[in-house]
Amino acid sequence: MDPSTAEAKHLLAFIERVERLEEDKKQVAEDIKDVFAEAKGTGYDVKILRKIISIRKQDKDQRREEEEILALYMAALGMAD
Amino acid sequence: MDPSTAEAKHLLAFIERVERLEEDKKQVAEDIKDVFAEAKGTGYDVKILRKIISIRKQDKDQRREEEEILALYMAALGMAD
Amino acid sequence: MDPSTAEAKHLLAFIERVERLEEDKKQVAEDIKDVFAEAKGTGYDVKILRKIISIRKQDKDQRREEEEILALYMAALGMAD
Amino acid sequence: MDPSTAEAKHLLAFIERVERLEEDKKQVAEDIKDVFAEAKGTGYDVKILRKIISIRKQDKDQRREEEEILALYMAALGMAD
DNA sequence: TCAGATAAAATCGCGC
DNA sequence: GCGCGATTTTATCTGA
């Protein structure tokens, strides 16, 4: 594709937007690692921290799922939510 | 590879074992679909069934995770479990 | 829902049938992993094994499709197959 | 653990920092999906876009690696880079 | 540094 | 046909 066409520029714009966002994501992932490293330096057991976070996440997910099934039940019973 | 060598036969044996197991897996997946189809025919809402199953699974996972973190805590405290 | 009603028992029966089948499926999936692990221990490259299996699967699908097309032609020509 | 202790607050602070960062990461991931969705709406084939991005990433990694090798050679030859 | 475990992406397939 | 969910593959990460 001729890179000077408007078409090519349009395409490149999308690609570069994604690439920038992926850079951001990578950066955030590194920030998370840094926090764990800092916690470890303060004496915390990283494995336990991860497990706590995982359980808290499951709690949240479970609550969300329960709300969803409630909505499904209400829809099945013809009730607005 | 010459398919008459012992090497080739050995390789083929692994491949065919996997292929048979994948057939089994596919069969089980179809059985599951059949059960949902039957439930639907009996008047159940398949989406709700799936959601219930999903929540029950989360319950089980959560219980398992809680046991794991308990074990981690006990290990951290130097207690056998 | 009152879990003692026939309705609830009926529902639970479906759910438990699916759960049992999902257990089976999980078990078969683990068996497949075990075979790959064994092959790996024998010196095979698992990634390549997977590739071979995938290609064989494609071949089979293609052959099946060609047979179906052949059957269609034969039917169109009024020939039994 | 008594959640009112300084210790518990300290722990919670780490956990919440990680949780916030994970929220951020999730948000960025969604932004990426949005860009792809927009590109799709403009007529692009998302699969191809992903392929292009993947190739560009490989190129970049390769270029970086080549620069590193070059630096190694130059260092081995006693040349500053 | 590597294997094993874990998590993330991409692809596939179903149901709506 | 399109989103959504499930599955599979790929990448990342941790512990030995």
Image (spheres, coloured by chain):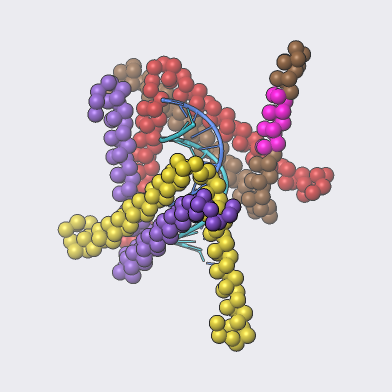
Chain colours: A purple, B red, C brown, D yellow, E blue, F cyan
Which image quarter is the C terminus of chain D in? bottom right
D74 magenta-colored: no
* Residue A81 visible at all: yes
- Could you tell whether D5 is left or right of B23 in the image? left
Q: Quadrant of residue D63?
A: bottom right
Percent of width and height locating residue C53: 67, 42
Q: Residue at x 56, y 50 (%)?
A: D51
Q: Quadrant of the N terminus of chain D?
A: bottom left
Q: Is residue C22 above or below residue B74?
A: above
Q: Does residue B79 show up?
A: no
Foreground pick, F16 / C77: C77
Q: Nearer the viewer, residue B13 or B51?
A: B51
x, y percent for residue D71:
57, 78
Say which quarter of the image contains residue C61: top right
Residue A77 in the image: above or below residue C34: above
From what the image shows, is residue D68 above or below residue D51? below
The extreme bottom residue here reads D78
In front here: D56 or B55?
D56
Q: Is residue C80 left or right of residue C21?
A: right
Lateral position of residue A55 relative to residue C31, left or right: left
Q: Looking at the image, which residue is at 33% across and 52% down?
A: D23
Q: Residue furthest left?
A: D4
The residue that appears at 77% across and 47% down in the rendered structure is B8
Magenta span dominant secondary structure: helix
Residue B74: % across, % down: 33, 57
- Residue pictured at 68% horizontal, 28% vertical: C65
Q: Which residues fall within the magenta stretch?
A: C57-69
Whole-percent x, y for residue A30 in the image: 40, 63
How many numbered circles are shown?
A: 0
